[in-house]
Image: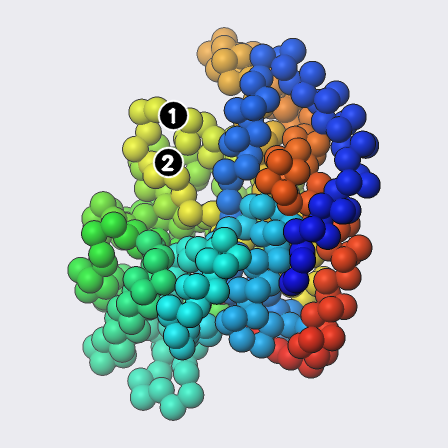
Amino acid sequence: MEGLSSRIAEINNSAAQTHTRQFEILAETLEKDGHNIEQLLDKISSFQVAIPSWALGTGGTRFGRFPGGGEPGSLEEKIQDVGTLHALNASSDAISLHIPWDIPKDTNAIKELAASYNLKFDAVNSNTFQDQPGQDHSYKFGSLCHSDPAVRMKAVEHNIEVIKYGKELGSKALTVWLADGSSFPGQMNFRKAFGNTLDSLERIYETLPEDWKVLVEYKPFEPYFYSMVIPDWGTSHLLANKLGEKAFCLVDLGHHLPNTNIEQIVATLMMEAKLGGFHFNDSKFADDDLTVGSMKPYQLFLIFNELVEGMEDEKSANPVPAWMIDASHNLKDPLEDLLQSVEAMKLAYAQALIIDRDSLEKYRESNDVSMAQEVLQNAYRTDVRPLLAEARRRSNAAINPLDTYRKLQIREQLIQTRGSKTIATGL
Ligand code: PSV
Ligand code: MN
């Protein structure tokens, strides 16, 4: 979008006075509590969240899809949209591609285009949950777990091809999510399905470049209703351990049964140095793919509490996980939804950074339950929005990204240039 930075700067000018006042009040309070504002701002600015290439169009449900206008019709346009997000929030510096939904035709040109928006390529995702037109071996009854070795080989080769694209683009990780499972008792031999999956993953793992990771995602149900081959973090961890040191677990917030204590899973996986990636979204019932922080913001904060504790633990061998949003938007403008999601993640992150960890530990050790809760809630109830706005302002991004997006009429312009009927690839 031409001249975007200068138009953001103009809108920032009109918001500057109010922002500065709010930021100064917050900075003073935090400093009194012993926080170093510059360090906090640095951490907040460096926190970047990858955008999946499938989240830029309007998603549907099983019952219908109501496309909004101006959806990206090509990979180039998807990159342009992530560039717009990054210009607005300075927090979305990477795009995560799904193959074959987004196969780059000319990888060099795509890399150059991404670089022109200061974007890089995050984990590449394979897709063995759909058959492609004319596909010779069907994934209807599974992919890496399939009873037929020819189907398994097809799925293995697909993953190896995805790694090839990722290498060309500069990605450093492959995310594998398997829709493999069964819908009826008796349909599948659990032990054979696990064994086949491990064997297939080992073949993929063998081809993984030295400096790459493979991230194994789990999900308790859907698309199958009776069993999934990788239903939970335990199974993902088992596979990652058996595969080796380049294999890690990936937690997707929507992939848990109601009321699961996800923050405890995070703590355990980080303790074991096996948390490699994170897919953020929010949900009321299951894998609802709603805007991050829209349903359970306190849970999100508690998860970030564990993430920050793990990341700041000098003894921890856990790598910094790959952060990604994995949501689909069937009611809201996808770009607005993504701005809100990134903001929610960064709010929870900033709140987790200001937890008084020494006091928390002291109260835990002395079993002072009330005060331990107080410490957490003090941080959670602090309005850290001006801190995020200041980090953005210093990076020449928007003080108020969503408001700026509306003021600049970005969606209207996209509809004008791309039309109102384009449909992005994805779900
Ligand atoms: C599956 O529900 C999932 O979370 C996986 O990460 C897929 O790659 C993504 O959603 C899109 O289908
Ligand atoms: Mn996911």
Image: 212 above or below 297: below
From the viewer's perspective, tell me whether residue 165 is left or right of residue 377. Answer: left
Which residue corresponds to mark 1?
313
For the point 72% across and 62% down, the residue is 410
Looking at the rendered image, the quarter that the C terminus falls into is bottom right
Q: CA distance from mark 2 to mark 1?
A: 10 Å
The residue lying toward the viewer, choosing from 288 and 277, is 277
> Where does residue 183 sit, x and y in percent of width and height?
44, 71
> Where does residue 1 sit, x and y in percent of width and height?
65, 63
Q: Earlier in the sequence, mark 2 or mark 1?
A: 2
The residue tagged with tag 2: helix, strand or loop?
helix
Which residue corresponds to mark 2?
270
**Residue 114 in sight here:** yes
From the viewer's perspective, tell me whether residue 303 is left or right of residue 340. Answer: left
Image: 166 above or below 382: below
For the point 71% across and 45% down, the residue is 9
Dot label at residue 328: none
Residue type beneath disc 1: Asp
> Where does residue 383 sit, x and y in percent of width and height?
71, 29
Estimate how packed mark 2 is, as few (under 14), some (14 to 19) or many (20 or more) residues with alpha carbons within 10 Å.
many
The residue lying toward the viewer, choosing from 230 and 76, is 76
Callout 2–callout 1 Cβ contact below 8 Å: yes
For the point 76% across and 68% down, the residue is 412
> Where does residue 165 sit, x and y in percent of width and height?
33, 68
Estimate how packed mark 1 is, as few (under 14), some (14 to 19) or many (20 or more) residues with alpha carbons within 10 Å.
few
